[in-house]
Amino acid sequence: MRVGVIGGGFGRGIASAVARGGHDVTLCTRRSFETLSPGISVTTSLEETLQGELVYLAVPSPSLGTILEQLVHLVDGRHRLVHVSRGLVGTELKTICQVLVQRTSARRVGVLAGPLSDAVLREGNPGGGVVASDYPEVIRYVRETLGGPRLRIYGSADRQGVEVGAAMTGILLFALGFGAGMGFGPSTLGMLAARGMAEIVRVARELGGRAETLTGLAGFGDLMSAVAGDGRPEYALGEAVAKGQSLGEAQKSLKAHVEGAQIIDYLCAFAASRRLELPLVVALGSVLRGEISGEQAVERLMSRAVGGEGL
Amino acid sequence: MPNPRLLFRRRLALPQFRRPASKPGDPRIFGFNAERDLIISEVVGRVMSEIGGSSDSLMLALNETSHHEIRRLEAQRDEESAVHLPRWHRISRRVGSMDERELKKTLREELDRMSRDVAGNFDARVYDFALKLVRPAVVAAMNPRSIISRERNRAVLDLVLKCEGEVDVVQALAKQGTLVFVPTHSSNLDSMAVGEQLSRRGLPPAVYGAGKNLFSNPIVSFFMHNLGAYRVDRRVRASLYKSVLKAYACVLLERGYHMLFFPGGTRSRSGLVENRLKLGLAGTAAEAYARGLMRGRARRIFFVPITINYEIVLEAETLIEDFLKERGKTRYIIEDDEFSQIDRWFSFFGQLRDHDAGCVLRIGTPIDPFGNLVNGQGESLAPDGRVIDPSEYVRSGGEAILDSERDAAYTRELGDRIMESYQRNTVVMATQVVAHVFYRALVLQTAGLDLFARMRCRGDVGLSRAEVLEQIERSRSKLLTIESEGGTVLGTSVRDGRPEDILRRALDAWRYHTRVVIREEGEELFVEDPPLLLFYHHRIVMHAERLASGEAEHEAAIEMSRIWRDT
């Protein structure tokens, strides 16, 4: 099968895994690579990348808007688009799949998520991910092209749940880094992780997703992998912010960005309009906007009435 | 002696002295009767092949159907039970010992019976008569003393019933493919309003499904039987019946019969514009299109969203009562409402008479089965205006294929697009703006009460006339902004009228209802009927947050619009 991949960072890993399965890959990127797996041809032309039916969008959320502007004029009903972004858009928290369907004429869209790292994709370490789509054929295409003897691709019909999980675990990771930066130990962080996940579940449910999806690869799987040190920068950024840097300064000094940072404001607005209990997200938003200190955030969270451990 | 009403539930047809022949250029439906048997046999064949030929699958289908049918008929205890129950008991007893040939024969017979029960009839004489009847009947109801002439009927009806939007585009598309009209549903008058306007605008008649309960009114039943309506019995739970309905709709679409579905399922009990659509049968469009492509003669299918907007709704009182009673449960069938009371018809039309544009049909931009907008040439358009090839949506590796899960997902997407079209094309009426102002005041003045407690607040909440007029003006100005963004359409009376005219128009229109909605006492106006205010306000509740000013109104708006999100 001819497969297109847009984006040279994470996209390179996807291209490698797909090429390993014997498929022809067109990788659209401006980067140049010294070595690439056989079967991958590199191009800067989106038209060329969209020759096949299946296209992976592996650009980071901030660049997605720019790419989308061009895709609007190129995509049609033939394409199956699968994104790996960790974004939610606007105060109504539109998922990237929803944006793709609204802005382009593609309908068969899906999301790939879970603890997929370079080590798994490029080096072939055992691993797994989850692909979610309303279209079973999209799930089948991803399994056929990306899955292999050492890469297990699970399918899910809960697109909303997977997209919310992918977008919000980054925020939770940031919160955990923040907690560690304030000097809290594993017990505090354990509570933070569990209550944070409860908030993710509430958002997912409000958007039509299922709670159990978040116990899977797109939720806990992703979080555990990041906490175990898969190289995602959110934890370190959280630590740096807790120690007094602004988010901008921390991002600059660590040469990284929090993919989900901009959605914290959206989440706060969403929580207010839907009357949704998201105390951790709201407190984090207040800290990042400089309205309260980390200590005040902790005090606010700990002084809340405590009830049943419902989600 | 048999109940005479039952006679009308049977298919009453006018005698045929010679076989009617459809002329070239007649709408497809004029040739329906000649094709009826072919259609039925295709439906039966398709469902049979879906079930498969193994004894196990045949037995499972018969067992499942007999189980559901016996339960239903035993509960019904009516004439239908007397006829069909013994047969199902017999099948249920024997199915275990039937060989494959007998299983097939029995299943085929039952499918044939179901298909014949579903399939409609079309009589061009009844169609002509119905069209001639609707106008004078409505006009006579509006003004019984008027001298009835064709011109006058048309003039009066033109005044009350307006049709706007993409009429020209739809007229052009009717010649290029199959149209699927998908209107909003507030009243049993909707079918008549749409039927009358389709004919008036030179659009072809459409085949439509009607709940079996509608056949309880003998006059309506006669027309339904003979105007191509197919019967849907919502009490039948057997999945075999659902397959028959689905195959019937699919075959009709493939054969180019224009169709009409109410995707909201039933009339909107709450008054909300439909925001959850049941595109079950309309969902066969993607399959019908794919089957056509596979046979090398694809016929395009175009969905035409229509909003039907009433200043007052004939059955509003019963509908909102039903909504309040049954919130949390589902009750589909109301047998006895204003629709079956002829005096309410007179009262309704009599009130509408004084309201030009009291009913507005607004036709939205047509959409293909995959959710793309379609232009007058029948071309599907990408969001950037490019012409795209719709056949790509059903191809895999270049070949058109059938895939029911894929088509179900397309149908959900289509449903979202139709819903968006409904919102954009909802015509805001004076009654809705005024109801919104009063209902918001009710919420603000009864903070902490739940919906049901609030419904009992009769005469407790009042506003001064000056406040009401100021709030109407404010709401209108915000609605104008929403309209300029393409979010809705304002009715003429709301767009151009002075606030006092908008208020007067609403209060006059509500006189149709048997209960007082707003009581005027000098310069004070009091809420007398919260349920009816709720019903009319619901039509624009999706804009509640944008219509609010200040924190308190905003909080109230969040509470009010919760229903829009949760429904």
Image (cartoon, coloured by chain):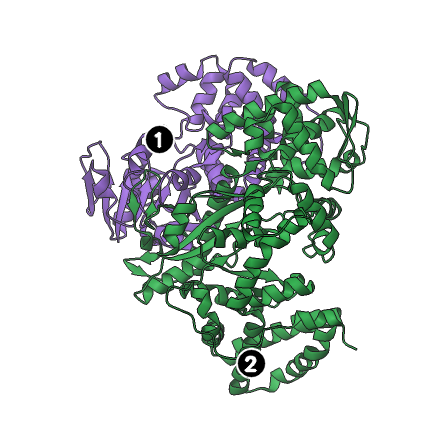
Tell me if residue A72 can be seen.
yes
SS assignment at label 1: helix
SS assignment at label 2: helix
Rendered view: B491 above or below B387: above
Rendered view: B564 above or below A188: below
Which chain is assigned purple?
Answer: A
Displayed quadrant of residue B383 = top left
Tell me if residue B42 can be seen.
no
For marks 1 and 2, give the one nearer the viewer: 2
- Residue kind at label 1, given as amino acid type: Gly
Which chain is assigned green?
Answer: B
Q: Which mark is residue A284?
A: none
- Callout 1 crowding tier (Cα within 10 Å): few <14, some 14–19, many ≥20: few
Residue A155 picture location, percent across and down: 44, 51
Alpha carbons under labels 1 and 2: distance apart = 58 Å
Residue A182 picture location, percent across and down: 53, 18
Displayed quadrant of residue B224 = bottom right
Q: Nearer the viewer, residue B454 or A167?
A: B454
- Callout 2 crowding tier (Cα within 10 Å): few <14, some 14–19, many ≥20: few
* Residue picked out by circle 1: A65
- Residue kind at label 2, given as amino acid type: Glu
Rendered view: B333 above or below B167: below
Rendered view: A296 above or below B133: above
Is disc 1 in contact with disc 2, using a CB cutoff of under 8 Å? no
Q: Nearer the viewer, residue B120 or B155?
A: B155
Residue A296 picture location, percent across and down: 60, 15
Q: Nearer the viewer, residue B181 or B249?
A: B181
* Residue picked out by circle 2: B109
